């Protein structure tokens, strides 16, 4: 899961990003509503933590525009304002949840897990498996299993985040730029060919598992996860 933190208090934003990454999430951050909206529109994020009091565009403005654009990414509002009318305004504008500062990180993580279960339709309290065809990706242990062969294999950090992106978007062509931004982030200095290197790693692991899934190249564009029989160039 990749999370965007839109928070103008730099110390809080940095603390949130560090805590999220320590929990195994991919995370990017920004300090104003306008850039936050641009990043939301990229479609790279699975969840947004959005402060209400922001420069350039308020959190409510960002939320309202996001929903008008039919972008359904889950959004949790973060604010120091505890008045009932602020909560109502946020929820009426399309927020999925609301948490008042100061808050405990354990509570925030619980709310993130709750929204993840809700968005995937899972009733499981653990909700730690992403499935796609005969593949099962454990988001806790970062292990990948093929249900047909019964084999499993652990994935390293970047491998895991890249394959999770593919498995959450099966059959969709993902460009190298999209993959780079998703896995390495906006501030990364990762080289362009890093994507190809990790695709090679993942292909070898998929072959080991004897899965029907393959990562196929789409010439001049990027890659997509397909079932056996897709054209891999």
Image: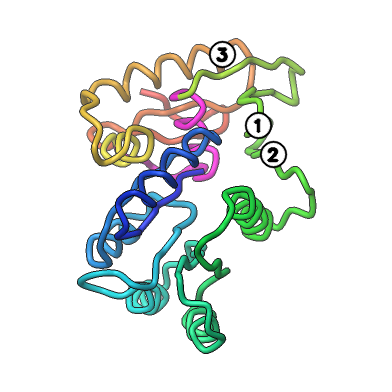
Mark 2 burial class by Cα count in 10 Å: few <14, some 14-19, many 20+: some
Q: Nearer the viewer, mark 3 or mark 2?
A: 2
Local SS, label 2: loop
| For residue 92, side relative to residue 142 (left or right) | left
Q: CA distance from mark 1 to mark 2?
A: 6 Å
Identify the residue at image location x=32%, y=21%.
Answer: 196
Q: How is the image coloured?
A: rainbow
Question: Is residue 160 rendered magenta in the image?
Answer: yes
Q: Which residue is mark 1?
A: 140
Residue 98 image offset from top left, x and y in percent? 55, 70
Residue at the bottom extreme, as displayed? 85
Which of pointers 3 and 2 lies earlier in the amino acid sequence?
2
| For residue 166, side relative to residue 44 (left or right) | right
Q: Is residue 77 above or below residue 155?
A: below
Residue 207 image offset from top left, x and y in percent? 56, 13
Q: Is residue 34 above or below residue 81?
A: above
Identify the residue at image location x=32%, y=25%.
Answer: 195
Contact, mark 1 vs mark 2 (Cβ under 8 Å)? yes
Picture disc at residue 207: 3
The part of the chain drawn in magenta is: 158-175
Q: Which residue is mark 2?
A: 128
Closer to the camera in the image, 74 or 146 = 74
Identify the residue at image location x=29%, y=56%.
Answer: 39
Mark 1 burial class by Cα count in 10 Å: few <14, some 14-19, many 20+: few
Residue at the front extreme, as displayed? 102
């Amino acid at each position: 899961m990749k999370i965007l933190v839109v928070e103008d208090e730099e110390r809080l934003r940095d603390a949130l990003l560090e805590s999220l990454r320590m929990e195994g999430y991919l995370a990017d951050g920004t300090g104003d509503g306008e850039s936050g909206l641009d990043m939301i529109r990229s479609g790279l994020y699975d969840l947004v933590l959005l402060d209400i009091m922001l420069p350039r565009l308020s959190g409510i403005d960002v939320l309202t525009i996001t929903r008008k654009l039919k972008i359904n990414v889950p959004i949790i509002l973060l604010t120091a304002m505890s008045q009932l009318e602020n909560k109502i305004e946020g929820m009426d504008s399309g927020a999925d949840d609301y948490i008042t500062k100061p808050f405990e990180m354990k509570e925030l993580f619980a709310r993130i897990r709750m929204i993840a279960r809700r968005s995937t339709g899972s009733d499981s309290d653990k909700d730690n498996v992403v499935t796609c065809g005969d593949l099962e990706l454990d988001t806790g242990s970062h292990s990948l299993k093929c249900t047909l062969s019964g084999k499993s294999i652990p994935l390293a950090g970047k491998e895991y985040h890249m394959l999770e992106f593919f498995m959450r978007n099966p059959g969709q062509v993902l460009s190298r730029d999209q993959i780079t931004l998703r896995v390495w982030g906006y501030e990364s200095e990762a080289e362009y060919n890093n994507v190809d290197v990790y695709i090679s790693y993942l292909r070898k692991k998929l072959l080991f598992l004897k899965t029907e899934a393959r990562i196929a190249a789409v010439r001049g564009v990027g890659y997509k996860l397909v079932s056996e029989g897709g054209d891999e160039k």
